[in-house]
Amino acid sequence: MAEPIIHHRTPQFSQVLTETGGMLRELYQTEQPVLMISGSGTAGMEAVVANLIAPNDKALIVRAGKFGERWSELVTAYGGISINIDVPWGEAVDPKIVSQKLAETSDIVAVFVQASETSTATEHPIEELAKIIHQQHNQVLLCVDGITGVGCFPLQMDEWGIDALVCGSQKALQLPPGLATISLSERAWQRAESHQKTSTYYLDLCKEKKAQVEQRTTAWTAPVSLINGLHEVLTNVLNTGLDNIFEHHQRLAKATQSGLQAIGLKLYSQAPSRSVTAAWVPDGVDGGALVKYLRDTVGVTIAGGQAKLKGKIIRIGHLGYVDTFDIIAGLTAIELGLDRLGHPVHFGRGPAAAMDILKEGYAKG
């Protein structure tokens, strides 16, 4: 990424773009194109809504956190009708409830859900949802926010029947923010190409597909450095093997969860994600103060809670370039921070519990 930037309308960049697109198809486990657009993961989410939802279309939204609410806000912004399934934060959606809602509500065109609801560190059962939707409601599209899912755990787009899948560069793809990747199924492309889009220009995926697939370029100015970086990341990921990558993330997740519990913290989610873990802060401890102390004094950054969870939970990401000793350092820092804020701590228990799990990776290596 530090190399001199080449012009995005050159044969040299076309080659990088085409090779990267091919590797993205392997990552997404799809035969369909995976498009790259400038913007954060939210731009990818908006592009899906803009291309698949027309005014007055009904969409079923799984709202189990801040990012589920974002799907609803995007659908409403494009004139769609948001029919919401409100799931208690920290719980995964029950696929039977989705099926029941689809059966009792006519003309729903799409279901929107997170693979991993980052705000609550909760993983939704995407494979089960896809099976129910395609077996019982096969006219409905399944649209998945995979921003903290793609590259962390299996999301087999073609085999499961995911119709739209979004990722962002700053998560498992190990890059700075600013690049979104999007893939649509064949039937989602048919819908995108058949309904008139009057409210989007930059995010027109049909235009972007024509540019990237047929012309080996991008519709607009490409984020050249980010795509160069993505080419390198995907080369390493695919050489390592997706199964090994998924196993690595699973190990980090288990270690983080075990370490936090050994410290004495209670996990927040009832369906913990393999990409991020959340835990309640102890009574009497200000979660915001803990996050601030770790970031500004200790030099370790973790996330706090959002909305109604602000100050009540902490979140630790274990995806992408986060590795064994990042988890050990993070757990050590949390022990130090809790002690600094007056909560009793038995130093070393968290890192030791995590290391009991993390050492398995070195035994295999």
Image: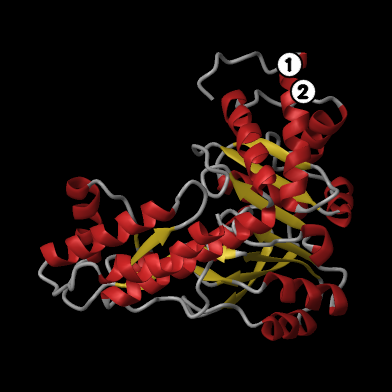
C-alpha span from label 2 to label 1 = 5 Å
Specify few, some or many for label 2: CA neighbours under 10 Å numbering under 14, 14-19, or 20 or more.
few
Q: Which residue is mark 1?
A: 12
Which of 328 and 305 lies nearest the eye of the viewer?
Answer: 328
Q: Is residue 86 above or below residue 30?
A: below
Give me the residue at 65% from left, 40% from top.
234
Residue at point 23% right, 76% down?
282
- Where in the figure is residue 300, as x and y percent of width and height? 28, 50
Residue 205 falls in image quadrant: top right
Q: Position of residue 62 (x, y in %)?
A: 61, 71
SS for dot 1: helix
Residue 88, relative to residue 298: is it above or below? below
Q: On the rendered image, what quadrant is the C terminus found in?
A: bottom right
Residue located at (87% from left, 77% from top): 135
Crowding at dot 1, Cα within 10 Å, few <14 / some 14-19 / many 20+, comes out as: few
Looking at numbered disc 2 in the image, what kind of residue is underneath it? Gln
Q: What's the image's color scheme?
A: secondary structure
Tell me if label 2 and label 1 are in contact, CB under 8 Å: yes
Q: Quadrant of the N terminus?
A: top right
Question: 285 and 47: which one is in front?
Answer: 285
Kind of residue at badge 1: Gln
Comparing 263 with 294, the one in front is 263
Quickly name the residue at label 2: 15
Task: Report whether residue 318 is seen.
Answer: yes
